Image: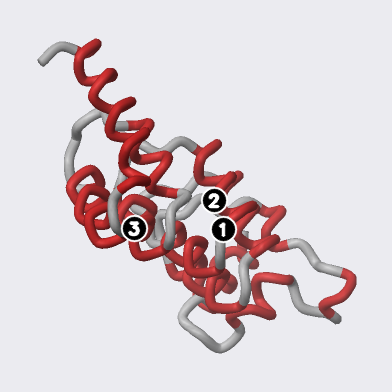
Amino acid sequence: MGADEIAQFDDILANIASDYSKQVRGQIARLIASSLSPFSRSAQRFAMDDIEVARPILEHSEILTDATLLQVVEQKSQDHMMAVTRRRRISEAVSQALVERGDDAVVTSLLTNQKAEIGSEAYVWWPSGGNQPHAQRHCCGGQGSDRIAERSLT
C-alpha cells in the first residue's frame, strides 16, 4: 500500500469512526496508538473523542502534533489532560498549557514525568497563589516536589 492509499484510508477511517460504538472506536484507537502507521487524521479525531477512546492515543501515539495536544488541553476534560501528562514526550508549550489549565492531579502528574519539557514560565509566582509557585502549590510534598527542588537550584 502506497502513501497516497494510506492517506485515503486514514481519511475514510477518520470520517466513519464516529459511526461506530465507543467500544469499537476504543479498539481502533488502541491499534493506531500502538502502531507506527501514519494514521494522523484518525489519531487526531480519536484524541478529541470520549476519554475511553482518546486515552491510548493521548498517552502513546507519536503521530499527534503539539497543535492537536494544545487543542485537547484547551477543549477537553481533566482526564484528557491527565492522559497527555503520561506521554513519552511533552513539549514546553504543551507543559505550559497543562500547568495553566490542569487541576492539582494533572500538574502533579506532569511534574513526575521526567521526560516532560517544563520551562521556567511554569514555575512563575502566581499572584493568587500566595508565596509559592503555581506548580509547587500543586505538588508540594508529593512526588513532583523533587522536580521543583531540582528546578529551584538552576
Q: Mark 3 against mark 2, which lies toward the viewer? A: 3
Location of the N terminus by quadrant is: top left
Q: Is residue 32 above or below residue 84?
A: above
User: What secondary structure is found at the residue carrying circle 2?
Assistant: helix
Q: Which residue is mark 2?
A: 72
Q: What residue lies at 67% left-to-right and 62% top-to-bottom?
A: 101
Residue in the picture at 42% in, 39% down? 44
In this picture, residue 33 sits left or right of residue 64: left
Q: Tell which of 109 and 40 is nearer to you.
A: 40
Q: Disc 1 residue type?
A: Lys
Dot 1 or dot 3: first in sequence order is: 3
The residue indicated by pointer 1 is 76
Residue found at the far right of this picture: 127
- Find disc 3 in the rendering and name its residue: 53
Q: Amino acid at mark 3?
A: Val
Q: CA distance from mark 2 to mark 1?
A: 5 Å
Q: Which quarter of the figure has residue 43?
A: top left
Report crowding for label 1: few under 14, some 14 to 19, many 20 or more residues within 10 A (C-alpha).
Answer: some
Q: Amino acid at mark 2?
A: Val
Q: Position of residue 17 (x, y in %)?
A: 31, 43
Q: Which image quarter is the C terminus in? A: bottom right
